[in-house]
Amino acid sequence: MRMRQSVNQFEAAFEQQKVLEQRRREQLRNRAVNRSRARRVSRSQQQGKVRFSVLAVCLIVTVVVVTIAMFEALLLVMS
């Protein structure tokens, strides 16, 4: 009788440990997914900032070049 009780206790403890390990693995997996998602969002925002900066610089350079070209052409026409 005592031996059966000991085996039953061992089996119950094993099942409980198995459930705890499954929960732990699932939590670790969820944390990894969340970290990956956060890194992806951060990287996307950073790339967006860089792209916007490049676009702004290109527009400013275009404005400066067109303005200079316009005044050069005006100077050429006037002389």
Image (tube, rainbow, N blue to C red):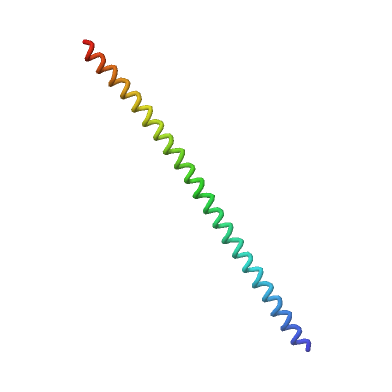
Most extreme residue toward the bottom, as rendered? 1
The x and y percentages for residue 3 are 75, 87
Q: Who's the residue at 29% across and 19% down the image?
A: 70
Q: Who's the residue at 67% across and 76% down the image?
A: 14
Relative to 5, does residue 26 appear above or below in the rendering?
A: above
Q: Is residue 29 left or right of residue 49?
A: right
**Quadrant of the image occupied by residue 79:** top left
Most extreme residue toward the top, as rendered? 79
**Quadrant of the image occupied by residue 2:** bottom right
Q: Is residue 69 left or right of residue 15?
A: left
**Closest to the observer: 63 or 35?**
63
Relative to 3, does residue 68 appear above or below in the rendering?
A: above
Q: Is residue 19 left or right of residue 38?
A: right
Most extreme residue toward the right, as rendered? 1
The x and y percentages for residue 26 are 60, 64
Quarter of the image for the N terminus: give it: bottom right
The x and y percentages for residue 75 are 25, 13
Q: Who's the residue at 46% across and 38% down the image?
A: 49
The x and y percentages for residue 8 are 73, 82
Q: Who's the residue at 45% across and 41% down the image?
A: 48
